[in-house]
Amino acid sequence: MRTGVAAVASLDGLEAAIRTVEARLGETLAPFRVAVERLITMPGVSQTGARVIVAEVGPDMTRFPPAGRLEDLGLTVKIRPAA
């Protein structure tokens, strides 16, 4: 059963690494907390998704003509009714 113990230890290590990365992301994105909080109010945008959007796009939307348009990057919000 040594393999099972090694797998659990490996998972524990991965979970610790994820917690470390998430903590660093939280610290790094602290100045952009308002932007992240606004993004997560959109249907389908999670905390992680909002952080990725802010990290990739940044908080200044004026550089996307017309200001704030991200459709060219594939970032569009489509709300579809549940079937």
Image (cartoon, rainbow, N blue to C red):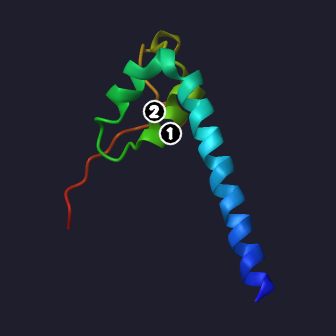
Q: Which of the numbered marks, if any, corresponds to residue 1?
A: none
Look at label 1 and name its amino acid. Gly
Which residue does the image show at 67% across and 65% down from the upper left? 11
Residue 24 spot, x, y in % from top left? 62, 31
Query: Is disc 1 placed on a helix, strand or loop?
Result: loop
Q: Is residue 6 left or right of residue 23?
A: right
Which residue does the image show at 59% across and 22% down from the upper left? 28
* Labels 2 and 1 touching (C-beta < 8 A): yes
Residue 8 spot, x, y in % from top left? 68, 72
Q: Is residue 16 left or right of residue 76?
A: right
Return the residue nearer the eye: 9 or 25: 9
Determine whether 11 is above or below 26 in the image. Answer: below
Q: Which of the numbered marks, if any, corresponds to residue 74?
A: 1
Q: Residue furthest bottom?
A: 1
Determine whether 42 is above or below 15 in the image. Answer: above
Crowding at mark 2 (Cα within 10 Å: few <14, some 14-19, many 20+) = few
Write down the quadrant of residue 69 in the picture. Answer: top left
Q: CA distance from mark 2 to mark 1?
A: 5 Å
Q: Quadrant of the C terminus?
A: bottom left
Look at label 2 and name its amino acid. Glu
Q: Which of the numbered marks, if any, corresponds to residue 71?
A: 2
Residue 41 spot, x, y in % from top left? 28, 35
